Image (spheres, rainbow, N blue to C red):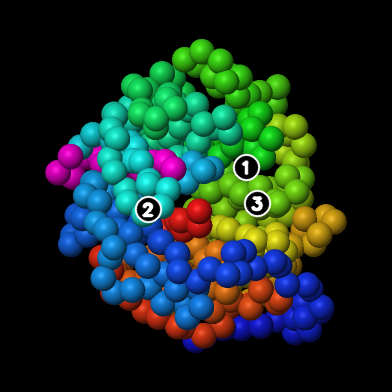
Amino acid sequence: MNRKILPWLAMAGGLAAFPVLAQNMTDYDLLVGAYTQGKSEGIYRYRFDSKTGQIDSTPRQVIKSENPSWLTLSKDQRLLFAVNENGPGQADTVGKVSSFAIDAKSHEVTPINQVNSKGDEPTHSSLSADGHFLFVANYAVHPDPGGVLAVVPVDKSGKLADVSQTLTHPASKVDPERQASSHVHSAVGSPDGKYLIASDLGADKLFVFHYTGKGPQPLQPAKTPSVELPPGSGPRHLLFSNNGKHAYLTLEMAGQVASFDYHDGVFKRTQLLDLSDKSVKQKVGGGGLHSSTDGKFLYVVDRGDVNELVVFAINSSSGQLKEIQRRSVEGIEPREFSIDPSGHFLLIANQKSNQIVTVRVDPKTGLLGDTVQKMDFDSPSDFRFLTR
């Protein structure tokens, strides 16, 4: 299992367990997105039993879609959006974004439409708080044309219109190979819906936009339009704390996680923590990050040669992080992970070793425990649970 618990962990035993959601339910639908260069066909809908932590081996539905690497659900879970991470060297070289309807009772997924994302290799998306726009991060591995943040209008039925606004910024060029141009890796809305924050790996910055919600170009630079990050650090994914007063950011190239105090579009960095032992020469790669339902614990992926999940306890007043565990993901290149609705299991999408690995979670301590299932699955990339 290869897990290490720090000596001070006894303090964590006094932390209260977060409330279990949907206590009377154990049968959920699990959506899995996948890269489709191999055997996978797109989006899969499985039965997940939150009592045992098991995913049924036979999918309830297969929705064909090219490289749906990131999935976004509307608040009411009636709409699903997927970025189609296409680009140079693939069968379809044009990045796209797709929308789907989800039946409220059966959870059957039905395609609505698809549009050009106006950039290469879209890797992330988020829906505005009012549901009127989908924000798409076009990563673009190649420097020409480079990364683009795209704004896609969405109507009430979930139908996507053509991209109405695009934004890009100069690269830092600290790393001549990976930072020759902008690489927008994620686009995340603030908890109050007033701002949109784009993490740009190529620029070593967060870009902050005020969301006006008006017209075809709803994003305008905020009063403090950007957040400087260490040169060559490569910001990837941003997550806000449950109370909205703090935020956490993975720095992919540096293999670090940063903590911030946050207020009304302004970020103040308070911590910068290594995800792995810097005294050991190895490839690192900060990846996905998610918190427990109660916001007391933060889970962060370190990819590269490490392939671990790092668990942090979150100080309830300061938002500061303290490491309590490192655990192997038991695979290669964990693209994403998700905690199930019960809070007792964590699912890992090990993209390069072609498996979904499910491990136990102790909600009281935040610690990751035994492996309960290893399910062969070609190039998994993202998960979403349907809970309504």
Q: Residue at x 48, y 28 (%)?
A: 133
Please say if the residues under marks 2 and 1 sit with CB atoms less than 8 Å apart.
Answer: no
Q: Is residue 298 visible?
A: no
> Magenta segment: does it hold 87?
yes
Name the amino acid type tagged 1: Leu
The 10 Å Cα crowd at callout 3, few under 14, some 14 to 19, many 20 or more, is many
Residue sticking out furthest to the right: 317
Please identify the dominant SS of the magenta region: loop
Query: Residue beneath label 1, please?
Result: 229
Gap in Å between the C-alphas at discs 3 and 1? 13 Å
For this rendering, which residue is in front, 243 or 100?
A: 100
Q: Secondary structure at mark 3?
A: strand
SS at mark 2 in the image: loop
User: Residue 34: x and y, percent?
Assistant: 30, 56
**Residue at horizontal 41 percent and vertical 61 percent from the top:** 29
Task: Specify the amino acid type for callout 2.
Answer: His
The disc at residue 107 is 2
Which of the two labelled residues, at mark 3 and mark 1, occupies the earlier sequence position?
A: 1
Residue receiving disc 3 = 248
What are the residue bounds of the magenta stretch?
78-92
The answer for how far apart the CA atoms under marks 2 and 1 are is: 41 Å
Horizontal side, residue 172 vs residue 20: left or right:
left
Of 233 and 345, nearer the camera is: 345
> Is 103 above or below relative to 214?
below
Mark 3 residue type: Tyr
